[in-house]
Structures are given as structure tokens and as C-alpha cells.
């Protein structure tokens, strides 16, 4: 009997009573306990939050992110070899769970490497932006979502962002359970899900709430999650992490503990909206992105301070030239300071500058030779209450530079009594 036939002969509820129950069902069905996370933005952030939950429960995990493979927290050399070893340990009982980040191109090219997943989470596509929906990248992503959905085993879980209408209306495989997450239970897709007694997670009274098998439970107050910082997409990431953990039977108390313990480490996910406090000012490191995602990052960064908004940006070669004018307009709003660096193609720079000057009061532009110089210039300008957003071309280098500056600025620890 094939694994697929075995699954169909052992139909199980998407809601497991415990992790041991969930893992036991998968072992009997010969399905690897691998959770896949896909989306245009935020995959690594979600995987790290889920990892923290599993650590709080004492579980042993392997991760495959865009920075490579880790087994029980140890980075591995290479990817396919270490991942194969991780899967072997999963089958042998040496690991409890594996988490895998999958990008759209990988899904389309390899069909997610032919895997069958008990849980698949899709975070976002376009944020309901019509211009995004028309891009070739999004057309590729939509095809990838259909293929990824077919990788969910019968009676598995497909976790979707209810705020992204394209995802909320996505089809699901026969027998798979849909678990929707959204900031508000009043969103149309969430209302339909709850009216049909489907499983969902949302925020009510600043608390993450779940509804499963007809029962509504409070999970954790957002005030306990220091890493969320009232950022909407961080709240969404916490909701997705909760849905993933509940889908494999993790207890509410363990989820609350894991999310509360989670401390983002920028060096492990550089350019994923990394936030640094430098005195009374704030520095955020993100990546160049299309306008439909940039709006969310700009809103979140602006809320960190009441001072000037300083923005550092390079050539942004991954942003389509037709979107550069809107990107320039967004970055130059709020009468801040715009530091531009690097070598731009003439046509792309012209489009960007046209967007900048389209504002009623555009930001002044300062030219820097390269990204390192631009960041140093921005750091030198910071005053109390200012916020500097760096759309880093080299996110790892930017994180190291800023982290070192923050470390040097930290007050020295007082000498202990009797110290020389």
C-alpha cells in the first residue's frame, strides 16, 4: 500500500489532541513531519517564531531557511545533504519536527521537490494590490500556490492569511482542513470560516484567540510578545505561528511561552525588518521591495519615532522599473531625508527621482558612494526620536554594521565592588 493510500485509509481530524498524537498518526501513515511555509514576505520570521514554540516544548527541530539548513540550532554546510540527514533522523526518531521555507520559483520548478506535507502555511501574495496581481512574478506565484496546495496530504492543514483575498479564496485539496488567520474576525473570509465552524486565529482585545472544533480559546496577550511591537505584519506572523503549532497539537500554554520567549536574531534573518534601538532613535533594516510591500514597512517604521524619517536606498535592481516612481514617491514622503547610493541605470534613476519630486514637499536627497558610506552618513545624522529605514542591498553587512554601532553605544557595565 502506498503512503497516499495509507493516508486515505487512516483519515484523521486536522486537530490533534497533542503533538505525540499528531506525530504518531504521521508515523503510522509514513508521512514525514515536515511543515512548509511559503509566501512573498515573512517566511523566515514565521519559521523562527515556530522554532521558539518547539524549543519551549522541548522538541528537537531542523530548519531549512534561505540561509541554509540548521539541525537543533547548528548551521550545516550545504543544503541537500544536511536536509537528507535531517529527514533520516526524523524517520529514526532523532528529531521531532522539520520546518522548511519554500519560495515560489522552487515550487514551480520542482513541485516542492515532490514532497507531501501534513501542514502548509501560505503567508501572503500581494496584499490585495491590483498592480501586483498583474506582474509576471505574481502569475508565477499563483501557479506555485496551486501546486503547493496539491502537496498537502489528505486530512492535512492548509493555513492561509485571510487578509489576502487571493489566498483566502484559494482552493484546498479534498480532505484537507483550512485554518485561516487574520487580525480581525470581522474580515469577510474570517466570518465565512467561523460561520462554517472552521478553524481560525485572530486578535481580540489585544489577545491572540483561536477557534477550533467549535471552541474559542485565548492564547496569549500581545503585550507579552516584545518582538511584535504593535507591527501589523508581526502580529500576523504570530498568528500564523500559533496556527502552525495548534495544527500539530502543541498546547496553548507552550505556544504562549514560546511566543513570549521569542527574541528575533537579526544575524539569522538579515533584512527581515530588523529593529535596533540606538539611544532614543530607531534603526530598521529591511530589503528593497515593490511599492505594495513597502507601504507596510514604511508605516511600521514611522510609528517608532516622532522625529525625522531618514531612508537609505540603493539601486533596487529587484524592483521593476515601472514601479520605481511609486517607490520613490513613498520613500520621499513625510519631509525626511533620503540617502541614495550605488550605481543606477539612467532610466531607473530618472523614474525614481520623478517619484520623489511628485510629493508636495519632497525629501532632500543626499548622494553616497556605497551602502556602507550611506549608513554611516545616516547614523551621523540621527537625533532623538529619529527613525532610519535602510533598504539594504547587502542585508548581512548592514546588520553587522548597525549591530556593532549599537553595541559600542551601549553604556559600559559598572565595575563590581573591589574590582581594580
Image: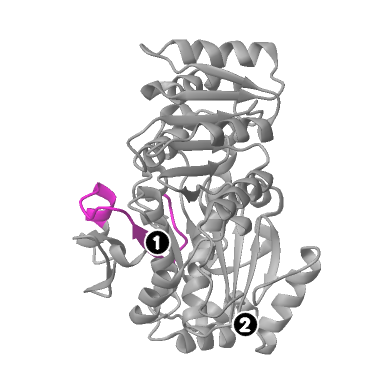
What residue lies at 43% left-to-right and 11% top-to-bottom? 358
Which element type, helix, strand or loop, lies under badge 1?
helix
Q: Is residue 15 magenta?
A: no
Numbered mark located on residue 152 in the image: none
Q: Is residue 43 above or below residue 357?
A: below
**The magenta segment:** 169-192
What residue lies at 76% left-to-right and 68% top-to-bottom? 76
Q: Residue 62 placed where, x, y %?
A: 64, 73
What residue lies at 40% left-to-right and 82% top-to-bottom? 16
Counting other residues with Cα less than 10 Å from the Cα at mark 2, is it few (<14), some (14-19), or many (20 or more)? some
Quadrant of the rendered image containing residue 4: bottom right
The color scheme shown is: one colour
- Per the image, the residue denoted by label 1 is 238
| Tag nearer the camera, 2 or 1 | 1
Numbered mark located on residue 30 in the image: 2
163 or 378: which is nearer to us?
378
Amino acid at each position: 500500500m502506498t503512503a497516499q493510500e495509507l493516508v486515505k485509509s487512516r483519515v484523521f481530524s486536522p486537530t490533534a489532541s497533542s503533538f505525540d498524537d499528531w506525530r504518531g498518526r504521521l508515523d503510522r501513515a509514513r508521512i514525514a513531519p515536515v511543515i512548509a511555509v511559503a509566501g512573498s514576505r515573512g517566511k523566515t520570521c514565521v519559521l523562527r517564531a515556530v522554532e521558539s514554540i518547539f524549543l519551549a516544548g522541548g522538541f528537537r527541530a531542523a530548519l531549512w531557511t534561505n540561509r541554509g539548513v540548521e539541525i537543533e540550532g547548528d548551521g550545516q554546510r550545504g543544503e541537500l545533504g544536511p536536509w537528507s540527514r535531517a529527514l533520516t533522523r526524523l524517520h529514526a526518531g532523532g528529531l521531532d519536527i522539520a520546518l522548511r521555507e519554500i519560495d515560489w520559483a522552487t515550487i514551480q520548478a520542482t513541485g516542492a521537490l515532490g514532497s507531501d506535507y501534513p501542514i502548509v502555511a501560505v503567508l501572503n501574495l500581494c496584499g490585495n494590490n491590483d498592480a501586483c496581481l498583474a506582474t509576471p512574478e505574481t502569475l508565477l506565484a499563483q501557479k506555485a500556490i496551486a501546486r503547493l496546495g496539491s502537496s498537502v496530504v489528505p486530512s492535512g492543514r492548509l493555513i492561509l492569511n485571510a487578509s489576502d483575498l487571493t489566498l483566502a479564496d484559494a482552493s484546498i485539496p479534498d480532505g484537507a482542513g483550512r485554518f485561516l488567520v487574520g487580525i480581525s474576525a470581522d474580515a469577510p473570509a474570517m466570518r465565512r470560516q467561523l460561520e462554517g465552524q472552521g478553524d481560525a486565529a485572530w486578535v481580540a482585545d489585544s489577545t491572540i484567540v483561536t477557534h477550533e472544533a467549535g471552541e474559542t480559546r485565548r492564547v496569549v496577550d500581545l503585550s507579552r510578545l516584545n518582538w511584535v511591537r504593535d507591527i501589523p505584519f508581526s502580529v500576523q506572523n504570530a498568528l500564523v505561528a500559533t496556527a502552525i503549532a495548534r495544527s500539530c497539537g502543541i498546547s496553548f500554554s507552550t505556544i504562549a511561552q514560546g511566543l513570549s520567549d521569542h527574541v528575533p536574531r537579526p544575524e539569522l534573518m538579515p533584512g527581515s525588518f530588523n529593529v535596533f534601538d540606538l539611544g532614543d532613535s530607531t534603526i530598521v533594516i529591511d530589503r528593497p521591495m515593490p511599492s505594495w510591500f513597502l507601504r507596510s514597512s514604511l508605516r511600521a517604521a514611522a510609528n517608532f519615532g516622532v522625529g525625522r524619517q531618514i531612508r537609505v536606498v540603493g539601486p533596487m535592481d529587484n524592483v521593476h522599473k515601472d514601479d520605481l516612481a511609486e517607490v520613490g514617491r513613498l520613500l520621499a514622503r513625510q519631509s525626511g531625508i533620503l540617502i541614495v547610493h550605488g550605481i543606477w541605470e539612467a532610466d531607473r534613476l530618472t523614474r525614481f527621482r520623478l517619484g520623489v519630486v511628485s510629493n508636495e514637499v519632497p525629501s532632500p536627497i543626499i548622494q553616497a558612494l556605497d551602502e556602507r558610506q550611506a549608513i554611516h552618513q545616516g547614523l551621523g545624522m540621527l537625533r532623538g526620536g529619529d527613525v532610519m529605514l535602510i533598504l539594504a542591498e547587502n542585508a548581512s553587512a548592514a546588520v553587522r554594521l548597525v549591530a556593532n554601532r549599537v553595541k559600542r553605544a551601549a553604556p559600559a557595565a559598572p565595575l563590581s565592588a573591589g574590582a581594580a
